[in-house]
Amino acid sequence: MRLFLVISLGVIAWAVSADAAERRCGWYGNPTPGDMLLTDRQGDWWITGGGEDRDAKGIENAPQMDETRFVETNVPGAGRGYNCACLTVETNAKTHRVLRVFAGEIVPLARCRADRALPSPD
């Protein structure tokens, strides 16, 4: 009976997380040290930093920057810039923060460049 209860609670927790997950695509970058952000049609979604010490849970599930598709900004060689990415995340719409990263992938820059609803990353 106890094992059944533990398994049931685990399934419920997974289902709640799955319902909260949403796929967001847009400019994925590190504009300043310690900050990671996804900018999509609805604005900026802070993953780390953003003036707060709360980083998203599951940050290890966020994709690594793809150097072959990376657009460098700011000082050359400083590692600041952006990729185009799609992330499966849980967000807080009020604070525009990513609460949890479930998965993510870097996609071709052309995808974001073709999306007229995205603001310019520069």
Image (tube, rainbow, N blue to C red):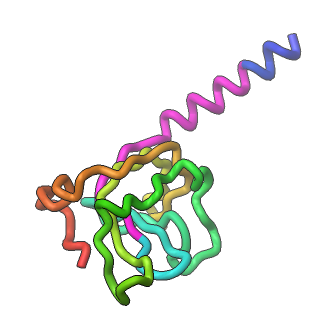
Residue placed at 15% from the left, 61% from the top? 113
Tally of numbered discs: 0
Which of the pair 67/36 is nearer the observer?
Answer: 67
- Residue 114 in the image: state x and y as whole percent: 12, 57
Which image quarter is the N terminus in? Answer: top right
Name of the residue lying farthest toward the right: 2
The relative height of residue 16 versus residue 54 in the rendered view (above or below) is above
Residue placed at 37% from the left, 44% from the top? 23
Which image quarter is the C terminus in? Answer: bottom left
Residue 16 position by quadrant: top right
- Residue 119 in the image: state x and y as whole percent: 20, 70
Residue 10 is left or right of residue 84, and the answer is right
Residue placed at 54% from the left, 48% from the top? 61
Where are the magenta residues, as a range? 8-29
- Residue 65 in the image: state x and y as whole percent: 42, 61
Name of the residue lying farthest toward the bottom: 75
Residue placed at 46% from the left, 81% from the top? 32
Residue 93 is left or right of residue 101, and the answer is left
- Residue 56 in the image: state x and y as whole percent: 58, 59
The relative height of residue 83 versus residue 61 in the rendered view (above or below) is below
Q: Is residue 16 magenta?
A: yes
Residue 51 position by quadrant: bottom right
Which of the pair 104/57 is nearer the observer?
Answer: 104
The relative height of residue 29 versus residue 102 in the rendered view (above or below) is below
